[in-house]
Image (cartoon, rainbow, N blue to C red):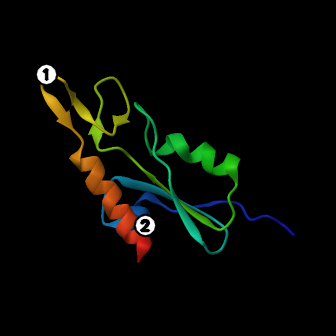
Amino acid sequence: MAKSSPKLMSFQIAAAIYNDPLIKKIIHTGDFYRQSIIALHGWTGDEGSMEPITKAIRVPNTRWILPQAPYPLEQKGFSWFSGSGESGWKFQKSFNLLDKIIERERE
């Protein structure tokens, strides 16, 4: 039986499904999906950082959602939080984004 290759949705389709510009990549492994995995990149990463993982793990019939963290970093990439102990920490945008993804996947 031949294995199908992962199907990458375009940024426009992915953003439209979730109505959010931070949802930049959705990858389907198979013609249909039975489960979803939200793959969060690390500090200084972006939505492309987790794409090699989707190919390496090869979970069949899965929707991989690869969001971009909402806080841009000065040096490069993005973070799931911003701030410092002195100025206070910002992370609500990350929680809002994850809530949106989880609610959409539960539909």
What label does residue 86 carry, if any? 1
Residue at the spot x=29%, y=44% of the render? 70
User: What secondary structure is marked by label 2?
Assistant: helix
- From this viewpoint, which residue is outermost toward the right? 1
- From this viewpoint, which residue is outermost toward the front? 85
Residue at the spot x=19%, y=33% of the render? 89
Which x, y percent locates residue 93?
A: 24, 49
* Number of marks: 2
What label does residue 13 carry, if any? 2
Q: Amino acid at mark 1?
A: Glu
Q: Is residue 104 visible?
A: yes
- From this viewpoint, which residue is outermost toward the bottom? 107
Q: Is residue 21 visible?
A: no
Classed neighbour count for the residue bearing mark 1: other residues with Cα under 10 Å, few (<14), some (14–19), many (≥20): few
User: Would residue 6 be found to the left or right of residue 45 on screen?
Assistant: right
Residue at the spot x=54%, y=44% of the render? 50
